[in-house]
């Protein structure tokens, strides 16, 4: 089994933490049910000087670090654009008419991608936030939008159970992965392969270009909410509604480590993960905690 330790647990939010995005290996932003967006110093375990109060809860956040622009999608369909240099909101986008459940920044294309509860997908200029494209997918909630390594494709995890793969030049749908009987919640690319997680508590591994299902495992007791790849793609990390985090062999999808409350983990639902480096990551959840985890070099038998 892997030796994985909780090296820091940080609290400060007054409600469930919905999302986390990193600025570097020692700082991150979170958004929570308390309607605050907060910056944290991870090594010190304290709040940084920045905090923003929203009118409604922010569900998802994304960062254009080159321009110091933070985008926050809220529960009423608005996207707040915060200039971190000015420490103030500079725009409130109102294209979405329902809760923004996903927002992602792609540095390769300098674009933000957002998705809402009604299945609308939007493309925004990464500097100006001018709207470039809106597509209706009629798929229910778009839970996450994942970008592949070179920015050439995105994966939409949709409430109808499908993961839709779009190319990012014209945003045509080039593949549709129909494997989950319930809503798809998350996906992550690994070259020509893709992992998907869903409400059905399964993890599925795909050759996404050919739409071929390679492997499927019952992964958690309840829905899978988020993924990370660590150790140069050798370890897959999954977060779940069942309050646990699991580390998997990316090749075989066998469990290497299960992290729960007794391991210094979460007491409630684990919502999101963020990668610090190849051996460290952050998790956030409904228990209002940020937890920093580290994979030690040596494995224990």
Image (tube, rainbow, N blue to C red):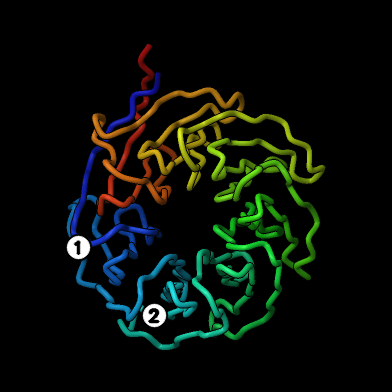
Q: Quadrant of residue 300?
A: top left
**At x 73% / y 60%, what residue is drawn?**
166
Q: Where is residue 228 shown, x and y percent of the image?
A: 49, 43
Who is closer to the viewer here, 21 or 195?
Answer: 195
Quadrant of the image for the C terminus?
top left
Dot 1: within a 10 Å radius of its alpha carbon, few (fewer than 14), some, or many (20 or more) residues? Answer: some
**At x 56% / y 67%, what residue is drawn?**
117
Q: Secondary structure at mark 1?
A: strand
Q: Which mark is residue 261?
A: none
Q: Secondary structure at mark 2?
A: strand
Residue furthest top in the image: 301
**At x 28% / y 32%, what residue is drawn?**
5
The mark nearer the N terminus, 1 or 2, is 1
Q: Which residue is label 1 attached to?
A: 47
Q: Quadrant of residue 54?
A: bottom left
Q: Which residue is label 2 attached to?
A: 82
Who is closer to the viewer here, 199 or 235?
Answer: 199
Instruction: Determine whether, in the image, residue 224 is placed left or right of residue 288.
Output: right
Q: Where is residue 120 shown, x and y percent of the image?
A: 64, 72
Quadrant of the image for the N terminus?
top left
How far, Cα to Cα, is label 1 from label 2?
18 Å
Q: Quadrant of residue 266?
A: top left
What is the tally of numbered marks visible in this picture?
2
- In the image, residue 296 above or below residue 222: above
**At x 30% / y 44%, what residue is drawn?**
268
Q: Where is residue 134 shown, x and y percent of the image?
A: 68, 77
Residues tagged 1 and 2 counted as in contact (Cβ below 8 A): no
- In the image, residue 252 above or below residue 274: above
Who is closer to the viewer here, 100 or 24?
Answer: 100
Dot 2: within a 10 Å radius of its alpha carbon, few (fewer than 14), some, or many (20 or more) residues? Answer: many
Q: Where is residue 284 shown, x and y percent of the image?
A: 33, 51
């Amino acid at each position: 089994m892997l030796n994985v330790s909780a090296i820091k647990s940080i609290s400060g939010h007054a409600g469930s933490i919905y999302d986390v995005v990193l600025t570097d290996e020692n700082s991150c932003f979170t958004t929570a049910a308390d309607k605050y967006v907060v910056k944290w110093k991870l090594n010190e375990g304290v709040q940084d000087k920045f905090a923003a109060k929203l009118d409604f809860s922010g569900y998802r956040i994304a960062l254009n670090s080159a321009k110091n622009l933070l985008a926050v999608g809220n529960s009423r369909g608005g996207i707040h654009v915060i200039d971190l240099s000015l420490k103030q909101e500079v725009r409130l986008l109102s294209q979405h008419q329902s809760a923004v459940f996903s927002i992602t920044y792609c540095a390769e294309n300098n674009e933000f991608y957002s998705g809402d509860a009604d299945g609308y997908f939007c493309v925004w200029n990464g500097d100006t936030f001018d709207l470039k494209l809106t597509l209706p997918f009629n798929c229910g909630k778009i839970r996450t939008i994942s970008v592949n390594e070179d920015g050439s494709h995105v994966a939409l995890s949709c409430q109808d159970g499908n993961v839709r793969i779009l190319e990012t030049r014209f945003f045509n749908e080039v593949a549709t992965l129909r494997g989950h009987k319930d809503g798809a919640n998350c996906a992550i690319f690994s070259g020509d392969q893709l992992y998907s997680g869903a409400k059905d508590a399964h993890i599925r591994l795909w050759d996404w270009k050919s739409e071929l299902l390679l492997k499927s495992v019952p992964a958690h007791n309840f829905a899978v909410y988020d993924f990370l790849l660590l150790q140069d793609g050798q370890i897959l990390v999954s977060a779940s509604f069942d309050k646990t985090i699991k580390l998997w062999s990316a090749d075989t999808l066998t469990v290497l480590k299960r992290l729960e409350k007794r391991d210094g983990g979460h007491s409630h639902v684990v919502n999101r993960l963020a990668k610090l480096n190849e051996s460290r990551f952050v998790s956030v959840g409904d228990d209002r905690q940020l937890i920093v985890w580290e994979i030690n070099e040596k494995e224990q038998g």
